[in-house]
Amino acid sequence: MSWGIGFRVRQWAKGSLWLLPLIGLVAGIGIAQLTLRLDGVVTMPAGWQYSASTATSVLSATIGAEVALTGFVVTVTVLGVQMATGTFSARYMRLWYRDGMLKGLLAMLMGTTTFSFVVIGHVETDSVPNLSVTLAGLAIAMGLLLFVLYLDRFLHRMRPVAVAALVATEARRAFESWVREASRPDTAFVAAASLRSPTTAPAFVLRATRAGVIQAVDTLGLARFARDNDCLLVFRHGVGDFVPVGAPILEVHGAEPPVAASRRLTSMVALGVERTVEQDPAFAIRIMVDIAVMALSAAVNAPATAVQVLDHLAETLRLIGTTPLDRTAVAPEGLTCGVIMPLRRWPDFLALGVTEIREYGGASIQVVRRLRALLIEMKDLVLPEHQAAVEDEMRRLEATIAAKFAGSIDLDRALVPDAQGIGGPAGSRDLTSIG
């Protein structure tokens, strides 16, 4: 199996809501056959021995309860989907339906149902599978416990701040993985604005055979390909970019690879219908910004939610701004055999994280005060070469405040930084500007 197919299979398995329940369904049948065999050699204590009518009633009640509970779980899940898409972001669903507890609960319910179906067929007047009936009772109790845990998890995850925290964790994990790839000696991450092809014409250009988003690339395999063929691979598009049919994805500079090698090259780039967070930390930031912007819409009007999202955005931006990625990457002009990929710069991440929130929340005192506090803190934390971008964002924020609060009696309050948006221990007036 090629790397690209393997990646798509893993993505499908993570997002599939029926694969694990199907495994549970089949496992229920297999476990039932095993326990029925054990019933012939295991004698249960007197308290766990049942009459045929009692066993039939227990198993029938178990089947009915599991079917009803499965329907209720599906109903709760559908309501969650409606709330998540209407309140948070449709892109959050990419993470939401990967929840292992939901799939585990459905697998448990379906497995218990099939287990009970098999066992009830072996209940006879003079022969009752006591062990199997007891396990069916324990299984329904475990299913109820899992349902309560799932409901608790579900309700807590419906809070916007919990969603923002979850997405921020995914963003940091993706970024740390990205840094490890960028630190490889045979891989150079170059700012997209300065990305230029070598002066020589490419020996081969890999073009998209179908439209889609570049979800991930096999950097290890690509670096190995470059060594084996003594060539330089230059990506024209980065992870997260949508490419139409025929668009160049990467160029091969050096000896033209054989046809079989070019097929191998194609297999190391995964295209899909939407972005993923695995190699695209900016996508996770995009989701957090969507949640904040949704909260700032006139239909919702919850600036406090946007402030909470900014809290988690701040930690994600801090991690990016304090990571010396440009210092560890190989200079592209010094790389003759390896991989060159477009790089998002710190200003790109910062603009993605704050621009739309400033645009849609510019008239909210909470939002502009939290943004000011965030930028002041970022200037103290990020690397020195990143401070100019923070200062530029502060100037843009001040211009937005001047336009939105022109003639307002609250202009003085809008200029005060506040880590809580409003109501917190606000900073002094001499901290309201950077420079």
Image (tube, rainbow, N blue to C red):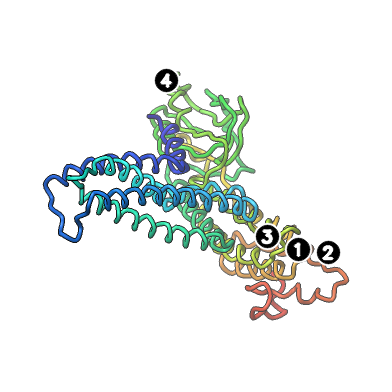
Closer mark to the observer between disc 2 and disc 1: 1
Image position, residue 277 (x, y; %) = 52, 47
Q: Position of residue 362 (x, y in %)?
A: 76, 63
Residue type (three-letter) at the residue carrying disc 2: Ala
Asked if residue 106 shows in the view, the reply is yes
Residue receiving disc 4: 260
* Of callouts 4 and 1, the N-terminal one: 4
- Measuring from the top left, give residue 286's x and y in whole percent: 61, 51
Q: Secondary structure at mark 1?
A: loop
The residue where tag 1 is placed is 362
Name of the residue lying farthest toward the top: 259
Using the numbered discs, state the Cα–Cα distance from disc 2 to disc 3 in whole angstroms: 22 Å
Residue under the image location 29 percent in, 48 percent down:
56
Residue beneath disc 2: 403
Element marked by disc 4: helix
Q: Where is residue 120, by image quadrant?
A: top left
Circle 2/circle 1 CB separation < 8 Å? yes
Nearest-to-viewer mark from 1 and 3: 3
Residue kind at label 4, given as amino acid type = Ala
**Relative horizontal placement of residue 407, taking residue 154 as reference (left or right):** right
